């Protein structure tokens, strides 16, 4: 077969061209599949890549899984708490339940201190152990909860729990127990610590000056309210707030004010009581007025549950009155009970009538030549008053050297004395002076008794009023008669106007200024009428020699 060799150009013709293309394709395919060095190198590289992917898969997936399984086995076989678990902020990962319980016991029940605080006064605070107020963590139950955390839901959940625990903590709330009886006992024990006594208002005197202490409220622990607060959420008290509430309540002072008592003390200190004392015999006036310092010494301020009282020391007032009375001398006295009443009334701002001095009996030693009438005339006291005190004289008469009981100088003042009016008569001057409130308001010429029937000197008083008295002994009428003393029992001498005989003759009109009567004191008709209207019973009549 002669193969025509073509110089490289294709011969025209359809069939021949197709054959050529087919032949070329066979050659190309054969060439593509022929194991060339490049293809052999690429095949070797592919095998190595597939081995690397498998190794990476084993490293990324299988190894951590294996490690996780190992970790799970580690925690379970050792019986310890999973990573990241903490109880109330106390880390317990890797602890057995027993170890965790011991740690929780130390932290929560032994070393922890809570703040006991007065909720109304936060500055009042103390550190206390939780157990003192009945609070504690049940460490066994709390540790059991910590151990159970992440377990019990399958291997995958436990693996996830371990995984998450490595990244962040898992908080377990402690199991809190509360004993209200222990708390009640603790609150009652703390009650005195919280108690602040209320201060009562006070009042005192220092050297006559009034000192006032203001009141202040106190406080006391409200045990039941505090217990109720704590029992309402003991877990929050222990875990969240670390606080024991102390609820206090105010205690008002028993004596909040002493304003009224202060006013009373000031009133007493400035009362300036005056005891006016009158001597009707001598016509003297005395004034007794304790000063501020003395009054202050009498004041007694008493404080008790009922309040503050202001009283006056009765004994010291009695001593004061008695001391003043002693200055009057041994012969003159006042009624001390009446004087005390007058003083106390003055301290209360009430005016009282004057105290009237009374006289004590004295002694008279009988001298030779004396008669009971002469003794009485000299003393200014009628004889019959002497017989009242010395009845033995009526039987046997006077004995020289005998000591007679002498009637007091005011023995003839039997009615209450009218202190601001006084009638004075002078036997020597035959004159009368009339006084009111110490001022002379009238004076008159008078006639007194003749020597054989004299007017008796002494201290007397108006005892009776007779518009027109009749003297049967002399058959005469005595206009505007003021009886002043009994010359003898039943025979009354007095003051009156010019007498009128029953026959119509007016006596003694031309003899005024000289003794003329039978013992009475005679005035003009006009003067007698004026005196009659002015002088009430009890007005003192002093008749001087």
Image (cartoon, grey):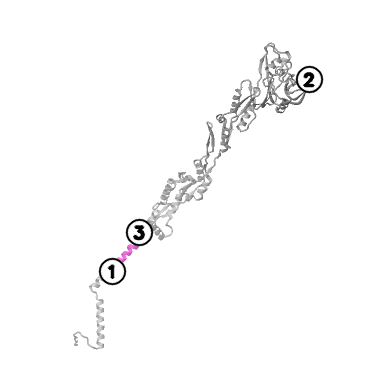
Circles 1 and 2: CB atoms closer than 8 Å? no
* Residue beneath disc 3: 67
**Residue 9: quadrant of the picture:** bottom left
Between 247 and 377, the one lying in front of the other is 377
Helix, strand or loop: magenta stretch: helix
| Camera-side mark, 3 or 2 | 2
Whole-number angstrom distance, CA of label 3 to CA of label 1: 29 Å
Disc 3 to disc 1: CB gap under 8 Å: no
Q: Label 1, on which residue?
A: 47
- In the image, which disc is placed on residue 474? 2
Quarter of the image that includes the C terminus: top right
| Count of numbered labels shown in the rendering | 3
Q: Residue 125, relative to residue 83: is it above or below?
A: above
Quick one: label 1 or label 2, which is nearer the N terminus?
1
Residue 202 in the image: state x and y as whole percent: 54, 36
Q: Element type at marker 3?
A: helix
């Amino acid at each position: 077969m002669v193969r025509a060799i073509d110089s490289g150009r294709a011969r025209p013709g359809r069939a021949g061209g197709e054959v050529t293309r087919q032949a070329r394709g066979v050659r190309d395919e054969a060439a593509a599949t022929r194991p060339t060095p490049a293809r052999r190198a690429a095949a070797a590289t592919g095998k190595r890549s597939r081995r690397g992917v498998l190794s990476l898969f084993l490293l990324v997936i299988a190894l951590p899984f294996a490690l996780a399984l190992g970790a799970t086995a580690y925690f379970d076989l050792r019986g310890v708490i999973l990573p990241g678990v903490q109880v109330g902020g106390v880390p317990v990962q890797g602890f057995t339940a027993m170890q965790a319980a011991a740690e929780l016991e130390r932290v929560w029940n032994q070393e922890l201190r809570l703040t006991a605080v007065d909720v109304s006064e936060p500055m009042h605070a103390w550190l206390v152990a939780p157990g003192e107020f009945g609070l504690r963590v049940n460490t066994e139950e709390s540790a059991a909860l910590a151990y159970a955390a992440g377990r019990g839901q399958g291997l995958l959940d436990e693996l996830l729990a371990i995984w998450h625990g490595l990244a962040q903590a898992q908080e377990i709330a402690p199991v809190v127990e509360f004993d209200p009886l222990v708390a009640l006992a603790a609150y009652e024990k703390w009650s005195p610590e919280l108690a602040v006594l209320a201060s009562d208002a006070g009042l005192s005197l220092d050297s006559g000056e009034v000192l006032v202490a203001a009141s202040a409220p106190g406080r006391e622990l409200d045990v039941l309210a505090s217990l109720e607060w704590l029992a309402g959420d003991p877990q929050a008290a222990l875990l969240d707030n670390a606080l024991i509430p102390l609820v206090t309540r105010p205690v008002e002072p028993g004596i909040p004010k002493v304003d009224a008592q202060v006013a009373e003390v000031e009133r007493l200190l400035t009362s300036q009581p005056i005891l006016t004392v009158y001597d009707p015999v001598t016509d003297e006036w005395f004034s007794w007025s304790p000063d501020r310092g003395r009054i202050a010494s009498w004041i007694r301020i008493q404080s008790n549950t009922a309040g503050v009282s202001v009283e006056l020391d009765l004994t010291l007032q009695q001593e004061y009155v008695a001391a003043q009375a002693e200055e009057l001398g041994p012969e003159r006295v006042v009624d001390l009970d009446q004087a005390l009443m007058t003083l106390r009334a003055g301290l209360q701002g009430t005016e009282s009538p004057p105290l009237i001095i009374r006289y004590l009996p004295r002694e008279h030693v009988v001298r030779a030549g004396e008669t009971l009438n002469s003794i009485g005339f000299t003393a200014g006291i009628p004889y019959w008053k002497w017989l009242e005190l010395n009845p033995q004289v009526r039987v046997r008469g006077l004995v020289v050297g005998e000591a007679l009981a002498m009637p007091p100088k005011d023995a003839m003042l039997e009615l209450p004395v009218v202190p601001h009016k006084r009638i004075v008569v002078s036997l020597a001057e035959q004159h009368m002076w009339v006084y009111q409130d110490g001022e002379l308001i009238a004076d008159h010429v008078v006639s007194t008794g003749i020597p054989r029937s004299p007017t008796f000197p002494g201290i007397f008083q108006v005892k009776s009023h007779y518009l027109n008295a009749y003297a049967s002994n002399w058959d005469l009428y005595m206009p505007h008669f003021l009886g002043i003393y009994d010359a003898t029992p039943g025979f009354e001498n007095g003051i009156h106007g010019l007498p009128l005989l029953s026959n119509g003759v007016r006596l003694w009109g031309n003899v005024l200024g000289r003794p003329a009567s039978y013992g009475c004191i005679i005035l003009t008709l006009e003067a007698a009428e004026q005196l009659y209207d002015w002088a009430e019973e009890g007005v003192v009549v002093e008749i001087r020699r």
